[in-house]
Amino acid sequence: MFRKMRRFKQQVTDEECKRILQEEKRGALSVIGDEGYPYAIPIDFYYDEEEHRIYFHGAKSGHKVDAMRACDKVCFTTWNQGFKKEGHWEWNSTSVVIFGRAKFIEDEKVVVDKLRKLATKYYPSKEEVDEEMASSAMNRVLVFAIDIEHMTGKLVNEK
């Protein structure tokens, strides 16, 4: 169903993909938007390796939510900061591309758990996470999951 990577010699292992998903802080979520146009937006995310899912949050209404209600098929991409080999000018970076299905998380216990894990990835302290979780903003937030159906990673040399 999913295409094999054309540049297979640049493909990285699933373990490398998972490492990048754990370490990187931002990615791009792509959905099928209005009138069939692609709609891609940057998001913060949390990868749950045990569940093999990407979690993220957002507002309860808007383009992203409307698009995922109309079609749950999504693409998520993230990439690392890359590196230069000594004596070379070009960057080497690894990207991870995921295809999957978006789900709206409605179980309140799961929502709180995943929001806490997501916040812990970004906030500098547990106290700040607790303050944010106690705020009234919780009422305005939806939590989404991407059930990963296909994942590939690729190391690219920009030369």
Image (tube, rainbow, N blue to C red):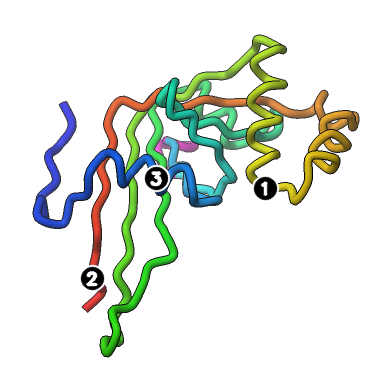
Q: Magenta includes 45?
A: no
Residue nearer the viewer, 30 or 119: 119
Mark positioned earlier in the residue sequence (1 or 3)? 3
Q: CA distance from mark 3 to mark 2?
A: 19 Å
Disc 1 residue type (three-letter): Tyr
* Callout count: 3
- Is 37 a magenta residue? yes
At a point 40% along the width and 33% down the height, the residue shown is: 74
The residues bearing labels 1 and 3 have C-alpha atoms spaced at a distance of 17 Å
Residue 86, image x, y percentages: 29, 84
Q: Secondary structure at mark 1?
A: helix
x and y, in percent, of residue 128 in the image: 84, 43
- Which of the two residues, 92 or 77, is positioned nearer the viewer here? 92
Going 40% across and 37% down the picture, which residue do you hit? 36
x and y, in percent, of residue 122 in the image: 67, 47
The magenta segment? 32-38
- For label 2, the SS is strand
Dot 2 amino acid type: Asn
Q: Locate the N terminus by quadrant.
A: top left
Which of the two discs, 1 and 2, labels the residue nearer the N terminus? 1
Disc on res. 8? none
Q: Residues within 10 Å of mark 2 (few under 14, many from 20)?
A: some
Q: Quarter holding the C terminus?
A: bottom left
Residue to which mark 2 is pinned:
157
| Mark 3 burial class by Cα count in 10 Å: few <14, some 14-19, many 20+ | some
Query: Mark 3 highlights which residue?
Result: 19
Q: Pinpoint residue 92: horizontal percent, then vertical percent.
A: 29, 70
Which mark sits nearer the N-terminus, 3 or 2? 3
- The residue to which callout 1 is attached is 122
* Disc 1 versus disc 3: nearer the observer: 3
